[in-house]
Image (cartoon, rainbow, N blue to C red):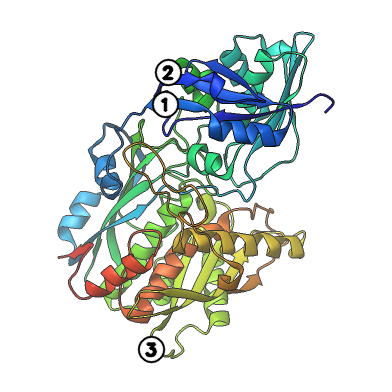
Amino acid sequence: LLGMLHARVVRPRGPTATLDALDASSVSAAQVVRRGNFVAVVAEEEIDAMRAARQLHVTWREATDLPPMGELHAWMRAQPVRDELVTANGDVQAALAGASVRLRATYTQPFQAHASIGPSCAVAELRNEMLTVWCSSQGIHALRGALADLLAMPRERIRVLFLEGSGCYGHNGADDVAADAAVLACELPGRPVRVQWSREDEFAWEPKGPAMLMELSAGLDAQGRISAWDYQAWSPTHARRPRRADDLVAGQLMHGVGLPDPAFFLGGDRNAPTNYALPNSRVTMHLLTRMPLRSSSLRSLGATANTFANESFMDELAELAGADPLAFRLRHLDDSRAHAVLTAATDRAGWGSALPRGEGLGLAFARYENDEAYVAMVAHVVVDDATGAVWLRRVVVAHDCGLIINPDGLRNQIEGNVIQSASRALKEEVRFDETGPTSLDWDSYPILTFAEVPEVEIVLIDRPEERAVGAGEPATITTAAAIANAIYAAVGARVREVPFTRERVRAALSARGAGTGANAD
């Protein structure tokens, strides 16, 4: 745009920090803008804005109230919650009490980043009392309302125009960088202002995929069938797209406030119920209004964590029953389409064949949102017993999303699902200290490399007589469980915490046979 200015926002470690001192004279070739704790530098050239952001003398009084990272899930369990009964049938308590054998286990999901390859960027211009914002927000109508609140400006004077930018599956920094640009455009009317986040900005300030905690209890009857199933999960909302000023990082800094309570809860219960035919089952969500890090939607919302817990627990119950994991699942499913995907995936993968020591096949099944696409997945892993290193060699996916319209596009979607979710399962975890995130680059937040991408084989089941349903997320949710089950099949080590790092696999190897993490009685 003609006459465009370039800006960088200079932020503290955490959103509730207080600005102690600012020396605007410490930079040249840039203008310093301050509104509350919101500080930015604006220059004619991008390189000057980048230099000024590094050189600006600014000191902050940081809040240090985040829990120790290693105590995150214990912290979540101790918080006030709003309980919501998602599903209930039969008498779970009586069935558990009368079960021949019972099992309990706990599984955890960390905060995860969207890890967009390119950091977020936006441009805004205030001209003739009309503010125009160009950005890659996935929710431009809601963002328009949040900007009106932030700037105390009528909605009618704000236009938010979508342009392709750094993408993600979910809610990355696109809304927040748009707010940065809008604030600065109002300070410098008549000139378009471009705000480019850095890699560190993106990792530090984008909303994270929420951490979750899942606890399961179940009972088996004398025939080895599940007679009781009790599922509990602790989760915040998975939808925090901005609707108000203080939903935005700029609003929190300008007003000196923390993140407001969510307007509603969404997504944490996705795929918490299963599609297994269980005579006595209950699913309870413990909904948290407060979390150490700001979080929002990441691909599949809570379905990835819930399916990881459900399908890992199914394998643990199968072992307790002395049953093959495939046969155990088929025994508890009365849906022919579920049987078909499980059979197709395991047949293609060579289920039941002998493998060398340290190699294993793991199985997982789910129906997305319990009434959409069916997915069965088999993961083939190799585990180094000495180091805990896990290599994902091969993934077989059987996929039934009803009528298939574009097979090639569908295969592309499934492959993308598998690669991203494998990265999340094996590597991805946002690290933080008492002030804020410390995973600020690709070294501290590694993702799957090209050399680590597994062979992906896909079996498509076309059902022209059935409605076509989405394929953008279903094959994401089974990956972590399939890998965890494969690790157990390979070396007898049960990993219940995502991601499956070398350290966690080594700890599970050390705990083999000790019953750590699950209790049977």
Whole-percent x, y for residue 295 in the image: 46, 38
In this rendering, position of residue 100 left or right of residue 88: left
Whole-percent x, y for residue 39 in the image: 53, 22
Whole-percent x, y for residue 338 in the image: 52, 65
Label 2 residue SS: loop
Mark 2 is surrounded, within 10 Å at the Cα level, by few (under 14), some (14 to 19) or many (20 or more) other residues, namely: some
What amino acid does circle 3 point to?
Arg
- Numbered circle sitting on residue 59: 1
Label 3 residue SS: loop
Quadrant of the rendered image containing residue 514: bottom left
Report whether residue 485 is seen.
Answer: yes
Instruction: State the CA–CA distance, disc 2 to disc 1.
Output: 16 Å
Classify the position of the C terminus by image quarter: bottom left
In the depicted view, which residue is nearer to us: 434 or 505?
434
Residue placed at 31% from the left, 47% from the top? 69
In this rendering, position of residue 387 left or right of residue 412: left
Q: Nearer the viewer, mark 2 or mark 1?
A: 1
Residue under label 3, please give it: 357
